[in-house]
Image (cartoon, rainbow, N blue to C red):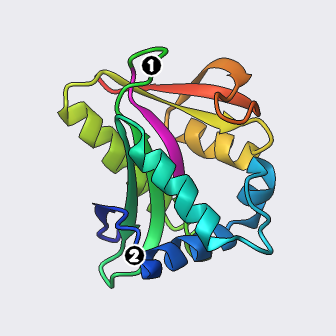
Amino acid sequence: MPTLSLAPLGFSPQEIAEVVDLYATNPEYCRAAGEYDPEHIPADRVEADLREEADTEGCEVLIARDEDGRLVGLLCLLDRHPADDQPWIGLLLVHGDIHRQGIGRLLAGLVEERFRGEGRDGIRLAVLENTPTSLAFWSALGWQEIDRRADNQHGRPCIVMHKQLA
């Protein structure tokens, strides 16, 4: 299993270009989410969206790099959701060229371990209903559906999932 390092997104032009590339390698997600046209992903908009996320109280935008320094993933984490006081994964996106190589599983495990280490007993996320592959991924990792509702930001139909950490 590869070794990954997590660090806050620094918003340098090079990092933003790498994140844009990461989104571009995930056209199915881009189409499902409806936020970016996978054929033309504007770097300035990606940067603005991620800065807004990072500037939200309790939110972090992290990048994952492999041992060679290649950007392999992007994570958006929320320390405490205002509705349920639980930590949430807002986004976990793996570079499309390395799907199905265990990177997503490793990143999810790192997030779970982090919150477990902070004494948290559970973690949540929302999967877009129109992404059955994502639902299958999270279900395989032991996450369970607890609700169905529209997401807060865009009103898209979502499946809310929870994983017990204790």
Give left or right: position of 8 versus 74: left
Give left or right: position of 99 versus 52: right
The residue shown at (65%, 34%) is 153
Pinpoint residue 47: horizontal percent, then vertical percent: 53, 64
Of 160 and 85, the residue lying toward us: 85
The quarter of the displayed image where residue 24 is located: bottom right
The residue shown at (34%, 67%) is 10
Of 62 and 117, the residue lying toward us: 62
Pinpoint residue 154: horizontal percent, then vertical percent: 72, 36
Q: Amino acid at mark 1?
A: Pro
- Say the numbered circle drawn on residue 12: 2
Between discs 2 and 1, the one toward the N terminus: 2
User: Is 27 above or below relative to 159?
Assistant: below
Given this view, does label 2 or label 1 mark the residue nearer the observer? 2
The quarter of the displayed image where residue 87 is located: top left
Residue 91 is covered by the magenta coloring: yes
Which image quadrant: the C terminus?
top left
Q: Secondary structure at mark 2?
A: loop
Instruction: Report the magenta residues as a range.
Output: 86-92
Q: Which residue is mark 1?
A: 82
Q: Secondary structure at mark 1?
A: loop
Give left or right: position of 66 versus 26: left
User: Is 6 above or below relative to 18?
Assistant: above
Q: Amino acid at mark 2?
A: Ser
Majority SS type along the magenta span: strand
Pinpoint residue 42: horizontal percent, then vertical percent: 68, 71
Which image quadrant: the N terminus?
bottom left
The residue shown at (29%, 69%) is 3
Residue 107 is covered by the magenta coloring: no
